[in-house]
Image (cartoon, grey):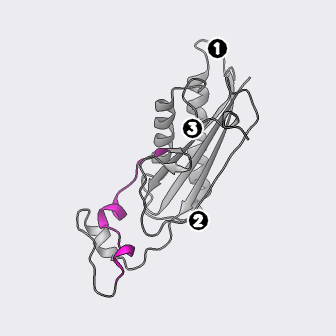
Amino acid sequence: MSESRFPHPTGANSPVPLQRLKQIANDACFAALEKVEVYDHSRTEGWNNTIISHILRALISESTPTGAGPGSSAYKFSVNSTIIQHMAQRNFNHQTASTSTSSPPVATTSQDPATLVSSAAAASAGVGSELTSGRASNENTGVGRRGMHSACGAYWNNEKDGMWSFKYETRGLDVVISVIWIAV
């Protein structure tokens, strides 16, 4: 398939500027997850609903022409939110991570240095990034990440329709968001 069928948006056809779209997604994830410390499967439906609703409300509001009534957006939107649990981290001192954000990992002779994670990385809340060719632009790799691959394709008008992906990293989980817009 030709690359033009699956463009990474340049902003030319986006219903809101891409920088604003990124801010909307970041705000939605932060609102849903700001107090979350670890992945809790029983709460993921609520988190996803909050994220999706926040993004949809903002997109509809910001793409509706001034003075137009409700439901007058020039676009239809689809938002997908996937929450990915981090795997438990091996050879990691949880007490260090929860009490300090600047200590380096503590290694012993029995630990594999490749499996260590700094407490700062483990304790900090992430900030989202746009996905380009399946890789976050501010890659934060580390122990405990699960593999994931996602793809999306569409047949549409490349001048009016588009899609955009985003990754939000936080304690114990990642969120991958996809937004699709179709001009009506």
Classify 119 as above or below 176: below
Range of magenta residues: 111-130
Q: Going by the picture, which residue comes out furthest to the bottom?
A: 110
Q: Position of residue 37 (x, y in %)?
A: 42, 62
What residue appears at the point 65 percent right and 32 percent down from the top-left corner?
162
Of the residues shown, which amino acid type is indicated by label 3? Ile
What residue appears at the point 59 percent right and 60 percent down from the top-left corner?
148
Q: Which residue is mark 3?
A: 55
**Circle nearer the N terminus (3, 2):** 2
Asked if the residue at tag 1 contacts the one at tag 3, i.e. Cβ–Cβ closer than 8 Å, the answer is: no
What residue appears at the point 61 percent right and 20 percent down from the top-left corner?
64
Q: Secondary structure at mark 1?
A: loop
Q: Secondary structure at mark 3?
A: helix
Q: Which residue is mark 2?
A: 41
Q: Going by the picture, which residue comes out furthest to the front?
A: 2
Q: Going by the picture, which residue comes out furthest to the right?
A: 155
Of the residues shown, which amino acid type is indicated by label 2? His
**Circle nearer the N terminus (1, 2):** 2
Q: Which residue is mark 1?
A: 68
Q: Secondary structure at mark 2?
A: helix
Measure how far apart labels 3 and 2 are at the Cα level.
Answer: 22 Å
Of the residues shown, which amino acid type is indicated by label 1? Ala
Classify 141 as above or below 181: below
